[in-house]
Amino acid sequence: MASPTERKDFESTKKLRDVMGKYFAELGRGPAEGKKTAWCTSVGPAELLRALGFQVYFPENHGAMLGASRMATDLIPLANARGFSPDICSYLTSDIGSYLKGQTPLQKMKLDGPPKPDVLVYNTNQCRDVKDWFQFYAREFGVPCLGIHTPRAIGEVDDALVHYVAQQIEALVEPLEKIAGARLDRSRLEETVALSRQCTLLWKSVLETAANVPSPLTFFDGTIQMGPAVVLRGAPDAVDYYQTLLAELNDRVAQGIAAVPGERFRIYWEGMPIWGKLKDLSTQMLSLGVCVVASTYCNSWIFEALDPADPFRSMARAYSSIFICRSEDYKEQYIADMAARFRVDGILYHDAKTCPNNSNNRYEMPQRLQARLGKPYLVVHGDLNDLRLYSEEQTRTNLEAFAEQLAQG
């Protein structure tokens, strides 16, 4: 095994910390300033909420923070004791455990915790768990919970489906106006959708720099850099940040600066991150000369269908097109296209125990793609947040063996 190699940190990181710090600081000040707060699922109608003047908070982002800080494993049992199964989404159980115990990584940012919601808005395009998650808090805080119910296993995102989902988004306007105490300004909605689209196109360009050889970016970098695309979609700060980051990445490409110095192999990460082990996994991949150049997960915040001239229908189309709610045939073709685009040597599938909706190794897909592409694969068993479901030694050994397999061609 190669010895660990030094890599050059991103100069944009300080700006990223400033952008994200400003977002959380504003969340903390909002209630004191009389601002209404909407909780939103990560692929929910954030543009509509921002256009109505809500400050928008994303519990899934908090769930990822709980995982990355390794607080989640100790908090999940509290939610289990409350009646939430250990088999359901560990974002949900760690977040509810955090609420029950009153402990959160936000306290390190001088916040008492998440801002209390005035309304909760979900979209089931990801899974049913987000609805149950938000309904728990609706009962706890005695506030409305509104939702969009998107079909699952979507093949073609046709006009009938777009019409069905768009009607649901439009139906949110009246109750949200009552809660916000303001009427929806169509021009403000169009402006917000335009900013969101600009953000998403920049984020796509950021991720696509990894198609270069060597890649200036890894999946592990992406899980950090995606923050503004998740929580500041529709806000100018996200656009400004990704313009800066993209310029730095393009400069690295021009100079041949590799995210993994001495890049030997390029692989694709399919599935959720293992938040509490990303640093360890990144370090091991670096030592093996393996660059994780692309992932389904980071690309989940690319919404090219957004169109400010047709905000409701374009939001419906964009948020019904995400990978997680598509058919098996669509997913297989998507991964095949990504493998070609990023010139990968192999595919890693994360089987996340509590996230069946985003574990795509369970219905023969790895075997089909191996036969189709002639590329080896590895399945890593773990979870997004619950580290009790992850074997560090087994994973380390399997990754070493996978690198040896890649070396043999």
Image: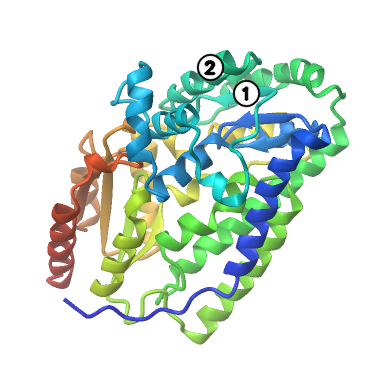
The residue indicated by pointer 2 is 135
The residue indicated by pointer 1 is 120
Q: Is residue 96 above or below residue 284?
A: above
Task: Tell me the element at label 1.
Answer: strand
Q: Is residue 225 above or below residue 46?
A: below
Q: Residue at x 70, y 57 (%)?
A: 239
x and y, in percent, of residue 206 in the image: 55, 63
x and y, in percent, of residue 46 in the image: 67, 35
Q: Dividing the picture into quarters, in which one does residue 309 lie?
A: top right
Tell me whether circle 1 and circle 2 mark residues in contact (CB < 8 Å): yes
Identify which residue, 254 or 335, lies in the foreground: 254
One can see residue 296 in this view: no
State how the image is colored. Answer: rainbow
Q: Dividing the picture into quarters, in which one does residue 247 lie?
A: bottom right
- For the N terminus, give its image quadrant: bottom left
Please state which amino acid type lies under the numbered disc 1: Leu
One can see residue 318 in this view: yes
Q: Dividing the picture into quarters, in which one does residue 14 lie?
A: bottom right
- Binning the other alpha carbons within 10 Å of mark 1 as few (below 14), some (14 to 19) or many (20 upward) gives many
Task: Tell me the element at label 2.
Answer: helix
- Binning the other alpha carbons within 10 Å of mark 2 as few (below 14), some (14 to 19) or many (20 upward) gives many
Question: In screen coordinates, is 40 left or right of 217?
Answer: right
Identify which residue, 231 or 308, lies in the foreground: 231
Question: In screen coordinates, is 275 left or right of 29?
Answer: left
Please state which amino acid type lies under the numbered disc 2: Gln
Q: Residue at the bottom extreme?
A: 255
Q: Which mark is residue 336?
A: none
Question: In screen coordinates, is 174 left or right of 137?
Answer: right
